Amino acid sequence: MLFNVPGPIVNTERQTASKPSLWKYRYVLVLASLLGILLFYQLSVVLLLRRTIFLPSSPFQGPKLVNPYQNWNGEGQEKISLHTHSDEVWFTPERHSVSEIISEYKREGFSNVAITDYGQISETENPEYIRGLEWGQNVKKRHLLAIGIKKSFYDYFPIYATRENLNWVMDRMQKLGGYVVIPHPKLFDSFSREEISSLAGFQAVEVYSPYGDDPKILDSLLSQGRNVHCMASDDLHYFPESSIKRFDQPGWKNAIQTLGNQRGRKGESFLRYIVTEEGTKDQSSVLSALQTGSFYCVKKFFHGADDPKVPKIQVTKDQTIQLNSSERYLEIRFIGQAGEVLQVNPDTSFAEYRFQEKDSYVRLEMIGLTGSILSNAIYRQLF
């Protein structure tokens, strides 16, 4: 007799159930892969795109004095604005056009203006204005400004850059014909004095900026024997309402500016600029003046004020600095090593200071009724 012997009871549902599939985690895996690629990329550029530059270890020295203003003739002057942003970049369509910027600055007596948009050289077929760009997309606002640069290039460090990486960027800017400026160092404390002192490759620092003024930064650098220039810039993003009313803007641009709280403000324009010698206003001659430091930095105290007049500075054969001006200043200050105030001359249009043995450099600050003026340094050189 055949017996029907019952076998073990098998749970077919448990048997058919497979191990958890990775497919359900596909979004997490894709995100992790992208983060890994980004991390690998960031580490690669940080390690590869570096430049170590050796900085001067002693103050200026030598028997010769270099005066960047020695060849100035007459009392004429050209107002130049070197830091403005237009609507040429795809993510800033609400800003002003290049033609609007040029026309408004000309209306205010400026001889020329540089358009320094983020990451690109704007409207390159227009020969009237000075070329430039602002590099840097990081949140901390560690940006760099290049005036007269011939070609834009990609920001390889959108998240993080070491000092050596920034040196690499500035070196590339100079190779492309740019005069390199550290802009708005006090904005979010993007560049501390200690960090600026450890970087190389820049030629000027924005010591007059809408985001904070600090001329003493220059003394930290000059005292090291580094011939770094001052810079004064509007960092223009939006004009005041009085200017905007003259523009024929489309409705959508008016709406975006209003929603962004950019309308009705005083604006950042016309108050901070450099002054070059009369006739020095096209890109080529302005760049030459920038390279040699043959310009002044000006900050006007309020809109509508008369422009403060820059002086004529000469150095005599007996190493005496002579300042003459058509304007009577409230105060003239001679400043030397480590920011020491060497001499103050109040209420005058003429002043003299003779270089002492201990002086490695001397720069001047002139305070007028309507604004303040900074000179670049007169410094010692071996030959």
Image (tube, rainbow, N blue to C red):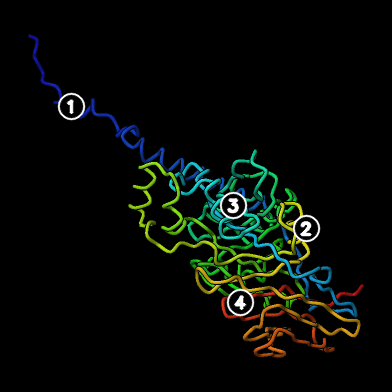
- Please tell me whether mark 2 sits on a helix, a strand or a loop: helix
Q: First in sequence: mark 4 or mark 3?
A: 3
Label 1 with label 2: CB-CB less than 8 Å: no
Q: Is residue 270 above or below residue 334?
A: above
Q: First in sequence: mark 1 or mark 2?
A: 1
- Residue 59: image location, x then y, percent: 79, 79
Question: Which residue is label 1 attached to?
Answer: 13
Locate the C terminus by quadrant: bottom right
Image side of residue 144 versus residue 354, left or right? left
- Please tell me whether mark 4 sits on a helix, a strand or a loop: strand
Residue at the image position 46 percent from the left and 49 percent from the top: 95
Q: Residues within 10 Å of mark 4 (few under 14, many from 20)?
A: many
Amino acid type of the residue that numbered disc 1 sits on in the rendered structure = Glu
Residue at the image position 41 percent from the left and 41 percent from the top: 31
Report, in whole angstroms, how far the alpha carbon at label 1 lies from the one at label 2: 83 Å
Q: Residues within 10 Å of mark 3 (few under 14, many from 20)?
A: many
Q: First in sequence: mark 4 or mark 2?
A: 2
Amino acid type of the residue that numbered disc 3 sits on in the rendered structure = Thr
Question: Which residue is label 3 attached to?
Answer: 116
Question: Which residue is label 4 attached to?
Answer: 372
Residue 318 quadrant: bottom right
Question: Which residue is label 2 attached to?
Answer: 288
